[in-house]
Image (cartoon, rainbow, N blue to C red):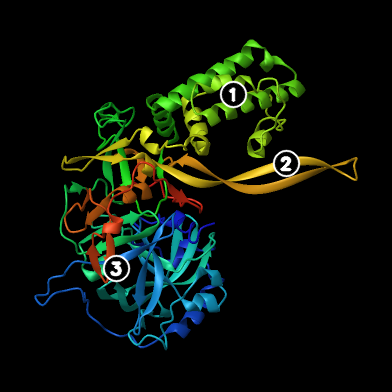
Amino acid sequence: MAPWTLFLCALAAVAVGDDLLLPREAFAGEEACSAEEDCGLELRQLRVQRISGSLRADAADDSGQQVATCSTLKNHGTFSSVDVSVGTPPQTFELVADTGSDNMIVQSCFCQERGYCPLDFGKCFRGSGQSSSFAMEEGPDGPVMNMMAFGSGKILVALASDEVSVGAVTTRMNNSLLLMVKQALKIQGSFEGILGLGRPHRHAMRRPGHRAIEGFMQAAGIERFSMCFNDGKPGVLGLNGPARGLPLQSVGTMHWGLDFRGISIGDSTQAVAFCTAAEKKPGMETACGIIPDSGTTLIMGPAKQIASLYTDLCTRWPRCAKMHDALTAEYEHLQRRNELALKVAVLKAAKVRFYQRVRALLQAGDSEAAATAEAFRDKDTEFASAEESDQTAADDSRTELPRQVTPAATLLLLLKNCHYWLVNGTDLSEMPSLFFHVAGTAGGLDTLEMKPNTWVLEMSSRIVEKHTKKLLGYLPVEIVSVSKEHVCSPAFGHMEYPTTLNGPVWIMGTPLFYQYQVHYDRGPDPPTMNFVREPCGACVDGKYTQSVALLQGQSGRALRRVDGEPVIKDINTTLPL
């Protein structure tokens, strides 16, 4: 599993907003510490004299105006991280840059030394005795601690103060640097912390007993920032850049959200199948919502709407439409031979023959494969991939084939076997683009074209093969081998996030950041977003540059490869957008 892949599942706190901390008492009986005394006494060792300091941002000119700067985003495939320095002298960490949260969280060495954090979490921060600018917030009983609840578990954090730098911007975080001192997270791999870039919560509800903690952007006085990714290369986190493009006012109160008005296929003027104006009921602000989120690998949406999208995609993609007709014909051929009504033992062989024909069709890539499939009809050849044979011929729990071959299933089959037809000059440009229609609260509209090389990914698939060999010439022994095969897959996942005011909510994950520079402005109320149609470029020595090598020269042939597990957030769907 990719490093940190699973803490991102966590970034929807169970509080009113991501920048709210719950007191330990709210988790009585479920705390990471074994006892109140244990938490208090152990953390006393972290005390140092409090150092008072004022807010400052070093990335400013002589007039005090902040100047544009940037920082490199390290590309991990399924997520991106940024180097963040903490303390004096600085200790540098790779923190996940995430627009879905608003806290600065860093792993404390106290957590590792006490055995509460595994060593494979990576580098840890040491304040006492190492950083001359470090201080802990003190309460009546020692350092102030709070429990934070996430989708993947809970962590205990101590509130601290220190100097924090991102790129050329340095500020003092007063009692808002969150040091993870104990954790009960269900994650694997590296996790050094989070750089939260979430929406400011000026008007979020404040429950009694909750405390709002400012993030780095607020502490540093940064109003505008941007994010974009490069395939196989570092991306760019821009800070204090100029206002760009058409600003869209954010919808809702909790997330960076927009009014989502559906997806056109192939052409921006095509009618949409869901999230239409007719679906907006009285009292609703939008028919659907969408959250641009750098911390989610895929584009997430309701299962019913994604199934509808797949069906329309297959219909509007000539190769898929022809393939669907050919597969339907093969299926009907089985029905005419009454193979579906045979006893289970014979049915297994019929299913093997059917999937052999499917493989032949996929190898040819269009309806002309019917002639090729005919040659397979009386052969007993088995597939090399037991992933298919195990799920079809060898699975006794399946006593029949699917009742029909759907266009959506055809699309997935065709993409899964893309290595057969994505050759000999064929590229993704034959596939249709997707056009996402979005709007802001003030009525501004934008249409975001997602080209095939952004909504289709190359991913690793686990293949299990089973063979029977005879030991000593007569004793049958089953041999199982496991390998990985690269397949194509739509960059979509299922997530049900219904809201009263904004309808079903989608998450627009990393594909958006590969296609556009996504700009955020925290200053206006509500804050705004816009999408700039320029190559991502690069950050060199804290300055943004449009490197010739990184200019947008990717053709429709380029297919982004993802080797790790996709990061899928476990958002608290009981909260509004």
Residue 216 shows which numbered tag? 3
Viewer-closest of 414 and 70: 414
Residue beneath label 1, please? 402
Please identify, in this view, whether the residue under mark 1 or under mark 3 is nearer the observer: 1
Hey, which residue is sitting farthest front in the picture? 424
Residue in view at x 37 percent, y 26 percent: 316
Does residue 414 appear in the picture of this structure? yes
Q: N-terminal of the two: label 1 or label 3?
A: 3
Could you give the CA–CA distance between mark 1 and mark 3, rounded to whole angstroms? Answer: 53 Å
- Is the residue 274 above or below the residue 527 in the image? above
Q: Which mark is residue 466?
A: 2
Single out the residue that lies furthest toward the top.
Answer: 336
Task: Name the residue at 48% across, 57% down.
Answer: 5
Residue drawn 36% across the image and 79% down it: 137
Establish if 126 lies above or below 483. below
> Along the line of sight, which residue is nearer the eye, 129 or 141?
129
Residue 150 vs residue 432: left or right? Answer: right
User: Mark 2: few, some, or many residues within 10 Å (few <14, many ≥20)?
Assistant: some
Image coordinates of residue 297 in percent, x first then y, are: 42, 50
Secondary structure at badge 3 equals helix
Structural distance between the alpha carbons of marks 2 and 3: 53 Å
Amino acid marked by disc 2:
Lys
Q: Earlier in the sequence, mark 2 or mark 1?
A: 1
**Viewer-side label of 2, 1:** 2
Other residues around mark 3 within 10 Å, as few (<14) / some (14–19) / many (≥20): many
Question: The disc labelled 1 sits on which kind of residue?
Answer: Pro
| Percent of width and height locating residue 304 | 43, 31
